[in-house]
Image (tube, grey):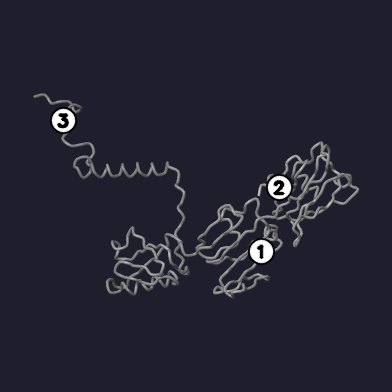
Amino acid sequence: MTALPSSRRPRSAPLDPRFANPLGKNLMRYLICLCFLAATTMAQPPAAPAPAPASAPGYVLGAGDQVSLAVENLPDEFATRTFRIDLGGDINLPLAGRLHAAGLTLGEFESQIEQRLVRYVKDPQAVVTITEFNSQGVSVLGAVNNAGVKQIAGSKSLFEVLSLAGGLRPDAGNTIKITRNLDQGPIPLPDAKSDPTGQFSVASVDVKAILNATDPAQNIAILPGDIISVSKADVIYAVGSVTKPGGFPLNQDVNLSALQVLSLAGGLTQTAALEKAQILRTVPGTSEPTQIAVNLKRIMAGKSPDIPLQPNDILFVPNSAAKTFTYKAIDILGLAAVYGRF
């Protein structure tokens, strides 16, 4: 019988022994899947990291804070669960029962839990992580973009808290008032005073001094429970024969002059009676504003000094085509109310 050529002989064994049994096939499939997953993960852009929960041992817990808990050898009791401290400062935990958590640091709270769990686990190791801060509130009021209660999760500087409130509005003034419960000590500023009730320390901060770095010490640390009130800027009005009548906030400026306000108002119209302008100024104790004559023509020609205006002043420039150059005080105030933006 003629033997078959070697190229046509039937093969009695597979080319690769890894494919000779199901175990080898499964191993190869597993390795291929791992390579595919690794390549897919590397191809995707990294996700933005989530804010890390706080776990500093020195953090002081309070009512409303929410925590998660991990205990070695007890994973099923606490995994994927969160627990909130109630208004009374207590918290209910599996196995450990009801504990008073408010006023304890994270380290102290972990020790309390471990003492309760020692009956179930030998040498328990508890790790507490804060998932929500709700007890470190600071109230931010006034001329900020997002007023309300802000959680600071520990001490932050004044400007850091203002940033949490969206920053200052364009009409913010130059004064920030801070009120603090005296239980936390007086505010560390030279002008800090106790209120008439003796319960609070009150102080003011000059925004301009901080922004210009002339007195960075005023950017003090803010504590939970503080109240921050940002004043609204005083306004000076320009009405009458100006291009853009309205109210203009002083912001961090101490004052504005007559010419500066005219510039903010877009300048004068062609029919403006420069030499007949008036400043209406409210004087405490009087029922009607005081009228002060202003010759803008001489000021603009450099023959008279510019006049500084005071908060709430109304600069009125009459129309030269009008039969009279004066208005009743009530009419001027009405014009300011119409044109003013604040």
Q: Which residue is mark 2?
A: 334
Q: Which mark is residue 105?
A: none
Q: Is residue 118 above or below residue 319?
A: below
Cα–Cα span, label 1 and label 2? 34 Å
* Residue 181 in the image, given as x and y percentages of width and height: 56, 71
Q: Amino acid at mark 1?
A: Val
Quadrant where the N terminus sits is top left
Q: Is residue 179 left or right of residue 29?
A: right
Q: Is residue 141 above or below residue 240?
A: below
**Quick one: SS at disc 2?**
helix
* 326 and 176: which is toward the camera: 326
Q: Is residue 336 left or right of residue 305?
A: left
Q: Which residue is mark 3?
A: 10
Mark 1: give few (<14), some (14-19) or many (20+) Cα within 10 Å.
Answer: many
* 89 and 314: which is toward the camera: 314
Mark 2: give few (<14), some (14-19) or many (20+) Cα within 10 Å.
Answer: few
* 105 and 181: which is toward the camera: 181
Q: State which quadrant residue 323 falls in.
A: top right
Q: Mark 2 against mark 3, which lies toward the viewer? A: 2
The reply to whether dot 1 and dot 2 touch (C-beta < 8 Å) is no
Q: Amino acid at mark 2?
A: Gly
Q: Which residue is mark 1?
A: 205
Among the two numbered marks 1 and 2 on one chain, the one whose residue lies closer to the N terminus: 1
Q: Amino acid at mark 3?
A: Pro
* Residue 19 in the image, given as x and y percentages of width and height: 22, 40
